[in-house]
Amino acid sequence: MTTSARAWVAGLLWLTLQSYVSGCAQPQHAAGLRPLPLRMVGWTVDDRTQEADSLSPTLRWEAFPRPEDLKADTSGRLRNVKNVTYEIRIWSADNWYPADLVYARAGLTEPAHTLDTPLAPDTLYLWTIRARFDLDGHQRVTQWAILGLDDYRVSVLPPSGRNLGYYGLKTPKH
């Protein structure tokens, strides 16, 4: 690693540590629709993984367009959004990498979905959602929901910062 790369990494870790120590390192969202809490068992140690209460949990997320989208839309174009549907993808996790796509649904008409195929018990999954909609006669999509680098606490960064972006879902042991 070059000296400049080491300095960059050291600076990034210092800033992240400062955020953690100051209490500012709460789970934050980088893009897309935000997932809403499952049965509030709480966030696990890494602050981005929720514990499911069943092997077929109901996942929920923000509806599109969100109030902040409408507020930021000074042209008023988002008032023309029609036919909003949602897509969800869930992967098994291998050391915080998405491994196999185990669940995918599209055309969901509500910002919630109960999995119709049970997941494996005591397993970590990675998931994301996005909205698909019509605007002015064209089909559009939002970004997939992701977290940013500042969403991770120094002590629990995945190895080499892998898998920055996916939300975690941990299934129960039963």
Image: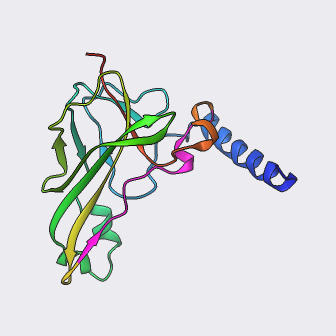
Residue at horizontal 42 percent and vertical 52 percent from the top: 146
The quadrant holding residue 170 is top left
Residue 65 appears anywhere in the view: no
Way the structure is coloured: rainbow
Vertical position of residue 75 compared to residue 81: above or below: below
The spot of residue 92 in percent (x, y) is: 38, 36
The spot of residue 61 in percent (x, y) is: 26, 48
Vertical position of residue 91 compared to residue 106: above or below: above
The spot of residue 85 in percent (x, y) is: 17, 61
Vertical position of residue 60 compared to residue 139: above or below: above
**Along the horizontal axis of the image, is 117 left or right of 28?**
left
Quadrant of the drawing holding the C terminus: top left
The quadrant holding residue 79 is bottom left
Q: Is residue 143 magenta?
A: yes
**Along the horizontal axis of the image, is 7 left or right of 44?**
right
**Along the horizontal axis of the image, is 69 left or right of 106?**
right
Residue bounds of the magenta highlight: 139-154
Residue at horizontal 18 percent and vertical 78 percent from the top: 80
Outermost residue, right direction?
A: 3
Residue at horizontal 79 percent and vertical 53 percent from the top: 5
The quadrant holding residue 153 is top right
Vertical position of residue 35 compared to residue 22: above or below: below
**Along the horizontal axis of the image, is 89 left or right of 12?**
left
The spot of residue 14 in percent (x, y) is: 72, 43
Q: Nearer the viewer, residue 149 or 122?
A: 122
Q: Is residue 87 magenta?
A: no
